[in-house]
Amino acid sequence: MKQPHVSLLKHAIRLMAVCAMLLTLTANVGASGPDGFWLITPEEAAMAPAPPDKRGQPGSGQLDVGREPPDTGPVIEVLRPLLGAPVSVPLEISVKFVPRGGAPVDMASLKVTLMKLFGIDITDRVRPYASPAGIQIPDARLPSGEHTVRITVADASGGVSQKHVTLVVP
């Protein structure tokens, strides 16, 4: 007869093994390698997309409360790649933050989310390439497909701005 604590121990060991596997799989997410920097991994690209009526809409991300910020923070300008045209990888990503009203950009507020059925926070991958002037990634890699990303940033006076960017990779 099995003792209950032995069964619990086996489940705990299995759970630890699964966690270790997940950590191993995600350890190199967004890493630079000989092929460039993976901004979005193939596994993330394969996930279910956000419903078409929710892409770029209020409440379209994880834990959103259903309203868009009033866009009173820094202006977010996408300089590269050109939006609306297919892109080739690796690609240069250049986003400019223009302070509004003299308040400096608050880099602690930067959040970059891949818009999927559940938003995927990719801020930590972008942060090494971000400064108060913007985001400069010289060699980002993205898998084939359509990728919508939401960039959110605030300024020191509390103004928040948001921009949705859709990139199409053939």
Image (cartoon, rainbow, N blue to C red):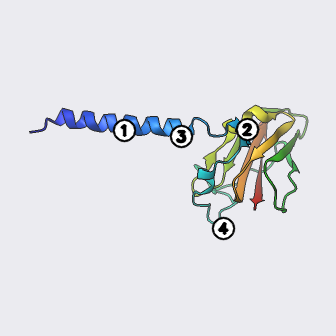
> Residue 55, position in %: x, y?
68, 61
Q: Look at the image and tell me in which quarter the C terminus lies.
A: bottom right
Residue occupying image coordinates x 85% and y 58%: 83
Residue 31, position as x, y percentages in the image: 67, 36
Three-letter amino acid code of the residue under disc 4: Asp
Task: Read off the residue under disc 1.
Answer: 15
In the rendered image, is residue 54 in sight?
yes
Question: Number of callouts in the render?
Answer: 4
Mark 3 / mark 1, whichever is N-terminal: 1
Provide the residue designation for mark 2. 34
Distance of label 2 from label 4 (alpha carbons) = 37 Å
State yes or no: discs 2 and 1 in contact (Cβ < 8 Å): no
Choose the circle earlier in sequence order: 4 or 3.
3
Task: Look at discs 2 and 1 and give the one toward the viewer.
Answer: 2
- In the rendered image of this protein, does residue 63 appear above or below residue 170? above
Asked if the residue at tag 1 contacts the one at tag 4, i.e. Cβ–Cβ closer than 8 Å, the answer is no
**What is the crowding at mark 1: few (fewer than 14 residues within 10 Å), some, or many (at least 20)?**
few
Say few, some or many: other residues with alpha carbon within 10 Å of mark 4 (under 14 / 14 to 19 / 20 or more): few
> Badge 2: few (under 14), some or many (20 or more) residues near its Cα, within 10 Å?
few
Report helix, strand or loop for mark 1. Answer: helix
Task: Kindly check if marks 4 and 3 are in contact, taking CB atoms under 8 A apart as contact.
Answer: no
Q: Secondary structure at mark 2?
A: loop
Q: What amino acid is at disc 2?
A: Pro
Q: Position of residue 120 (x, y in %)?
A: 61, 48
Whether residue 156 appears in this view of the structure is no
Q: Amino acid at mark 1?
A: Leu
Q: Residues under labels 3 and 1: Cα distance?
A: 15 Å
- Label 3 sits on a secondary structure element that is helix
Q: Nearer the viewer, residue 41 or 136?
A: 41
Residue type at the position of mark 3: Leu
What residue sits right under mark 3 in the picture? Answer: 25
Can you tell which quarter of the image residue 17 is in?
top left
